[in-house]
Structures are given as C-alpha cells and as structure tokens.
C-alpha cells in the first residue's frame, strides 16, 4: 500500500496497529507510517478489554505483570 500509485483508487483499511504499534515492536518497517500514508477517515472504534480469571491473585495491570514475571511459562 505504501508504494501504490497515489491515484486515489487504492485505499487501505487497517487497525491502528500498523501505524501506532508496529513502529514500536519491530526494529525496521518496509514503510514509513508517518509519511507513507494520508488518513482519510475513521470507520470504527474497537474497545480493548483485559480479563483475568478470578483465581489469579491480581487486581491491577501492574500486579498482573508482576505475577506473570514471577511465574514464567505458567501463564497464557
């Protein structure tokens, strides 16, 4: 998509991960998320939810991170 001709006929519909997450988790990208695209509009919002089994002894995301680090290979 980043290398498509700027003819107005090619549109990309994607989640925000291709532009906001990928630059932080990959060392190199084959595209420039800031210069390679022109936003046209938003078509949907997707809420994110973090759910934890009540048997896991945590109440906050920070406690969950500490629990996962203390139990390597036991949490999925």
Image (cartoon, rainbow, N blue to C red):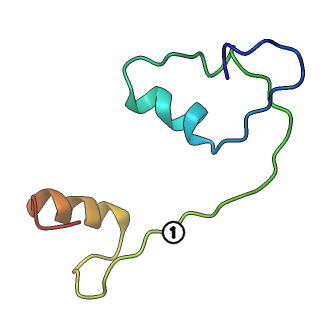
Which residue is under mark 1?
A: 49
In this image, 11 relative to 27: left or right?
A: right
In this image, 28 relative to 37: left or right?
A: left
Badge 1 element: loop
Q: Residue furthest right?
A: 8
Callout 1 environment at 10 Å: few (<14), some (14 to 19), or many (20+)? few
At 48% from the left and 26% from the top, the residue drawn is 23
Q: Nearer the viewer, residue 69 or 47?
A: 47
Q: Position of residue 33 (x, y in %)?
A: 62, 22
Q: Residue furthest bottom?
A: 55
In this image, 15 relative to 73: left or right?
A: right
**Residue 35: which quarter of the image?**
top right
Q: Position of residue 40 (x, y in %)?
A: 86, 33
For the N terminus, the quadrant is: top right
At 63% from the left and 45% from the top, the residue drawn is 15
Q: Position of residue 34 (x, y in %)?
A: 66, 19
Vertical side of 18 occupied by 72: above or below: below
Q: Position of residue 49 (x, y in %)?
A: 51, 68
Vertical side of 56 occupied by 43: above or below: above
At 15% from the left and 56% from the top, the residue drawn is 69
Q: Nearer the viewer, residue 16 or 50?
A: 16
Vertical side of 72 occupied by 53: above or below: below
For the C terminus, the quadrant is: bottom left
Vertical side of 8 occupied by 40: above or below: below
């Amino acid at each position: 998509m980043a290398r498509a001709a700027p003819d107005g006929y090619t549109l990309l519909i994607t989640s925000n991960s291709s532009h906001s997450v990928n630059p932080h988790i990959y060392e190199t990208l084959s595209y420039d998320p800031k210069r390679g695209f022109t936003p046209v509009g938003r078509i949907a919002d997707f809420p994110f939810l973090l759910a934890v089994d009540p048997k896991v002894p945590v109440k906050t995301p920070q406690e969950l991170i500490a629990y996962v680090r203390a139990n390597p290979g036991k949490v999925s």
